[in-house]
Amino acid sequence: MSRRKIVAGNWKMNLEAQAAGQLADDIIANAEKEKVSDDVELILIPPFPYLDFVGSKLKGVNIRYGAQDCSAHEEGAFTGEVSATMICSIGAKFILVGHSERRKYFNESAELLIEKMNKVLATIGTPIFCCGESIEDRKSNNHFSVVESQISDVVLELKKSDAEKIIIAYEPVWAIGTGETASPEQAQEMHAFIRDLIEKKFGKVLAKNLPILYGGSVNEKNAADLFKQDDVDGGLVGGASLKAASFIAIAKSF
Ligand code: 13P
C-alpha cells in the first residue's frame, strides 16, 4: 500500500502582494514545465491576505492551498481572528495547527490546539498538526517523550473518525530555519514512533494511511534522502518554498 505523497510550502510571514503573486505564478509554471507527478500533492500556504488571490490562480491547476493558522472560535466579536469556516469557504482546504512558531511566540497550549483542530475538522478542511522537540529536549534525550505528549495531548484526544482526516508534520524546532536538517535516520525514527502512537490508539489501518510530513530545512539537496524513508511521506517546507525552482525540485524528489 502506498500512502499519499505531499509537499506543502509554508510561506510564513514573507513577501509583499506582488511577489506572492509572482511566486504562485512561477510555481504553477514550474510544476507544469517539470512535469511534477500527479501522485504528488502540492499545497501552498501563503499569508492570510493572499489566500484568496493565490487560490484564484490555482483554479484548474492541480495544486491546492491552505492557511497558516485559524481561530479557536467559530464566529463573532473576536477582532483580528479568522475562522476555519471562513478559510474553507474560499476554497482553502488545509490549515496548519500547532506550528512551533505559534506555540513559542503566541503561547498556544494543547487545550487551544484541540479547539483549533476541532474547528478545522468541523469544516471540510484538513488540519496539518505540527509537533517537534526543541534542541534542549533533543540534547537531554527527551525528544521522544516531548513529541509523545504533543501527540497524545491533542491528536489522541480526537475521535477516530476525525483522526483519519488529519495530516501530521514532524518539525524538530532545532531544524527550522537553521539549515540544520534532521538526518534521514532521525526523521525516520521519529516518524515511525509517531505512527506507532497512532496505531496503539486508532489501529493499524488508520496509522498506515496517515501522512506524516517532515519539516525543518528541507531543500532540493536533502529531500530525496528524507522522502526515501519508509515513514516520511513528504515535506512541510519553509524557506525553500519561497523559491519556485527549489519547491518544485523538492516535489520531484520522491
Ligand atoms: P524551514 O524549511 O525554513 O526550516 O521551515 C520549516 C517550517 O517551519 C515549515 O513549517
Image (cartoon, grey):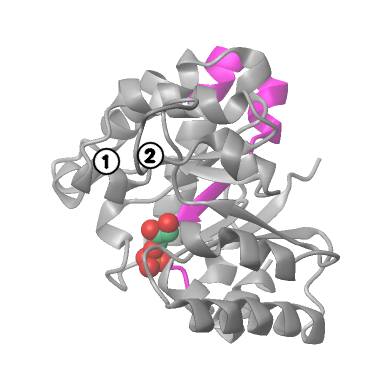
Q: Quadrant of the N terminus?
A: top right
User: In which image quadrant can residue 149 be found?
Assistant: top left
User: In which image quadrant can residue 179 be found?
Assistant: bottom left
Q: Earlier in the sequence, mark 1 or mark 2?
A: 2
Would residue 216 be seen by someone viewing this image from the given angle? Answer: no
Above or below, 96 relative to 63: above
Mark 2, residue position: 98
Confirm or deny contact between disc 1 and disc 2 (CB under 8 A): yes
Percent x, y of residue 77: 38, 29
Q: Secondary structure at mark 1?
A: helix
Say which mark, if any, is on residue 248: none
Residue 50 in magenta stretch? no
Please state which amino acid type lies under the numbered disc 2. Gly
The residues bearing labels 1 and 2 have C-alpha atoms spaced at a distance of 6 Å
Q: Residues within 10 Å of mark 2 (few under 14, many from 20)?
A: many
**Does residue 107 appear to the left or right of 84 in the view shown?**
left
Q: Look at 42% across and 22% down and name the residue there.
A: 114
> In terms of image quarters, where does ligand 1 lie?
bottom left
Q: Look at 81% across and 59% down and name the residue there.
A: 39
Mark 1, residue position: 103
Name the residue nearer the viewer: 76 or 110: 76
Percent x, y of residue 244: 59, 82
Name the residue nearer the viewer: 171 or 197: 171
* Magenta-tinted stretch: 197-219
Name the residue nearer the viewer: 228 or 39: 39
Above or below, 175 relative to 77: below
Q: Residues within 10 Å of mark 1 (few under 14, many from 20)?
A: some
Please state which amino acid type lies under the numbered disc 1. Arg
